[in-house]
Amino acid sequence: MQQIIFTKSNKIPIPLLGHVEAGFPSPAEEELVDNISFDEFLIDNREATYILKVKGDSMIDAGICPGDMVIVERVAEPKVGDIVIARIDGAWTMKFFKKRGGQVYLEPANKKYKPMVPTEELEIHSVVKGVVRKY
Amino acid sequence: MDQPLSLRAYPRAIVHVDADSFFASVEQAVNPKLRGKPVVTGKERGIASAVSIEAKQLGVKRGMNIREIRQVCPGIIHVPSDYETYSLYSKRLFEIVRRYTPVVEEYSIDECFAEITGLRRPLKLSYEGICEAIKRDLEHELDIGMSLGLAPTKVVAKIASKWNKPSGLVTIPGRQLHQFLDKIPVVDVWGIGGMTERHLNSLGIRTALQFARQNEWWIKRHVTKPHQEIWHELNGRSVLPLETEERHDYKSISKTKTFTPATADRDYVLAQLAKNTENACIKARRHGLRARRFYFLLRTEDYRHCGYEMRLSNPTNAPNVLMSLIREHLDRIYRPDTRYRLTGVVLSQLQEEAYGQADLFGETISIDRMEKVLGVADQIDKKYGKHTVYFGTSHQAIKGKQYTGERAEKSRRATQTFKGEGDRKHLGLPMLGDVD
């Protein structure tokens, strides 16, 4: 079984297969819609897209678990509220990108961890576009 | 002396794109631990196959062996090559350049030529602006430094991209050609090697500009056709076309394998040759080609080579046919008291499968039958990964340990897999490792 969870799904075009009415066959207008592959569905800009494997549980309350695959894209500027990948002390870290009073910081989705306020420059690598979990 | 070589800025606008320290840069892009550190790739071969910018600054050079590298740079990080990931980045490099122009020549894994002549209006950018945009996309999306050269010809663009590495953009319009070429030693011109340099030096020519300034009569008298073309190109007259076809017109296919320690075990050598042959044939079949000549070779511990070449009456890409030839002729070159460190095979005089001709003795029928079997094997490999099925002779080479000690280390991508990925089948996206 495969379950796929998406963040920011509002940006991704999803094929609509018509309405289904319970109990009655529907004259669905399937022939009017096109199919896309999971690749196309999950990836916007292929040349800028990468994958990582989640290790810790710091984003567990956002529904991202250890062992999950995150699909990330290098974008020009992260937006406040995005889940981002940052390069800190020779390792990748994944947190919410937040801003308060002009100060950017990284916020985990797990009460066990504290927000990270960068002392120097914060190097944002990419923005999380999707999460894939295969059972 | 100040007279320009050309009066027009860009009669044609040709860009040369070159990734800086490509393999090492890819390693630094996918592994945050390697960022800003001296890194070399090629651990499995025991040499530096690519050198990061930081390691270059410390004096490490390409081709150095482990001992030499550690001597100049004790803190070096030596990683095994990960060609799968390099190839993904290479494809991305070309795809990004193709966003701007369809005329792209994939010159090697980490460099390309692109023609942007006439694209200023549709892209609403100057030629320099187009180069800046290409460079920005490449460096941002791939996270790797890129050096670009813009010039009216391929030869000058190639020299220009090298002029300001790393992460440089050098633009040489026709009017400035003479000022630029005055600074370039003639040997640094693409296509001019050491022999030609000595020849030109003896004629009093040391810089690219001095070469470019010669008149046509002199050029025709003193240099060969390829160098006459370079002379045109240096003068801003583009004569070398961009080869935009994807490269699949293989003239020959070769597969070699080095193994350490060297061995005198005949069965092992035979197994390595069988694996070389299988791999070469897989590639030939993928491209629909058959060989009319076949060559196999051995390299001894002390770097002596011996080989044996055959003409094939029936062009083939079937490994079993070639293996029986190797078995028959191996002892012509194999010496039991010698230790070998490399085996290899070469398929040459390749022709398209469709042109096969039946022979008089019915051999074609059994070949046909074998090809059906191999076709199925290819399908199985496609579904389950390379070498799912293979010949028994290759077993020792495919399943056996190829390296011992630290050279046996696998690339990161080979060890960081997701559920559902096989040993030899991975998702087609670069894997950056673990994230906390």
Image (cartoon, coloured by chain):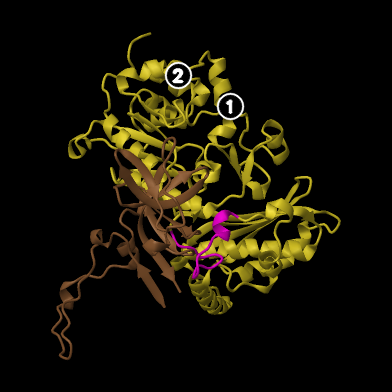
Q: In this view, does B409 lie above or below B112?
A: below
In the image, the segment drawn in magenta is B411-428
Residue B211's mark?
Answer: 2
Name the residue located 48 percent from the left edge and 29 percent from the top edge.
B224
Q: Is residue A48 visible?
A: no
Q: Quadrant of residue B132?
A: top left
**Most frequent secondary structure within the magenta stretch:** loop
Nearer to us in this view, A106 or B339 = A106
B427 is within the stretch colored magenta: yes
Q: Which mark sits nearer the N-terminus, 2 or 1?
A: 1
| Relative image position of residue B24 (x, y in whole percent) | 54, 42
Colour assignment, chain A: brown
Discs 2 and 1 lie in a common subunit: yes
Nearer to us in this view, B306 or B223 = B306
Tell me how many marks there are. Answer: 2
Q: Is residue B314 above or below residue B307?
A: below
Q: In this view, does B149 lie above or below B410?
A: above
Residue for badge 1: B195
Name the residue located 34 percent from the left edge and 38 percent from the top edge.
B136
Name the residue located 35 percent from the left edge and 41 percent from the top edge.
A104
Report the side of A126 relative to A66 (left or right): left
Give the quarter of the figure containing the N terminus of chain B. top left
Q: Which amino acid does label 2 sit on?
A: Phe
| Relative image position of residue B275 (x, y in whole percent) | 64, 64
Which chain does tag 2 point to? B
Colour assignment, chain B: yellow
Report the side of A113 relative to A83 (left or right): right
Callout 1 crowding tier (Cα within 10 Å): few <14, some 14–19, many ≥20: few
Which chain does tag 1 point to? B
| Relative image position of residue B145 (x, y in whole percent) | 44, 37
